[in-house]
Image (cartoon, grey):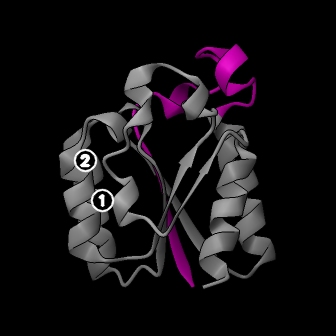
Amino acid sequence: MKILVINGPNINMLGIREPDIYGKETYAELCRKVEFHAAERGVTVEIYQSNHEGALVDRIQAAYFEKTDGIVINPGAYTHTSVALRDALAAVKIPTVEVHISKVEDREDFRQVSYVRDECIATVKGKGTDGYLEALDILLGR
């Protein structure tokens, strides 16, 4: 099984950006945690991050041609603004789990809307970076 983990803007700043909300774990530590979890389960995982919406769309589309079995996506701020990411997920029809490190329902009003959610099979939020591991397990359980 081949899983693509996509991270949107500012996720690369984990451990630096608002540690009271996102924790002190760095992006490199998150990547190692996800890679270890996937390896324990015999899954191939690729982790991708970009601060650019078009690059994220391109990566989702490429996943289709690479025969990717599932996507874990933390769109970051694009969750609340990007119809383009939603449409890319709709186009490829790859089972996708949306992840948010923070508990978005307890945050600002604008964070209550997710444009990608209706194209995802599940959403994991408010579990810190462990949410990525749960998302992987959701895809493996399909």
Residue type at numbered disc 2? Ala
Q: Which residues are magenta?
A: 1-26
* Residue 137: % across, % down: 70, 71
Residue drawn at (68%, 39%), measured in percent from left and top?
126
The residue shown at (58%, 68%) is 45
Compare residues 92 and 11 and report the one nearer the observer. 92
Q: Amino acid at mark 1?
A: Arg
Instruction: Please identify the quarter of the rendering in which residue 41 is found.
Output: bottom right
Q: Label 1 to label 2, Cα distance in Å?
A: 6 Å
Residue at the spot 73% in from the left edge and 25% down from the top edge: 23
Please state, as top left, top right, bottom left or bottom right, where the N terminus lies in the image: bottom right
- Disc number at residue 59? 1
Eyeballing the image, is 75 above or below 103?
below
Q: Is residue 15 magenta?
A: yes
132 to 28, vertically: above or below? below
Q: Is residue 142 on the magenta stretch?
A: no
Please report the residue visible at 27 percent of the width from the left and 36 percent of the height from the top. Answer: 52
Instruction: List the residue tagged with mark 2.
Output: 55
Using the image, determine if residue 123 lies above or below residue 63. above
Q: Residues within 10 Å of mark 1 (few under 14, many from 20)?
A: some
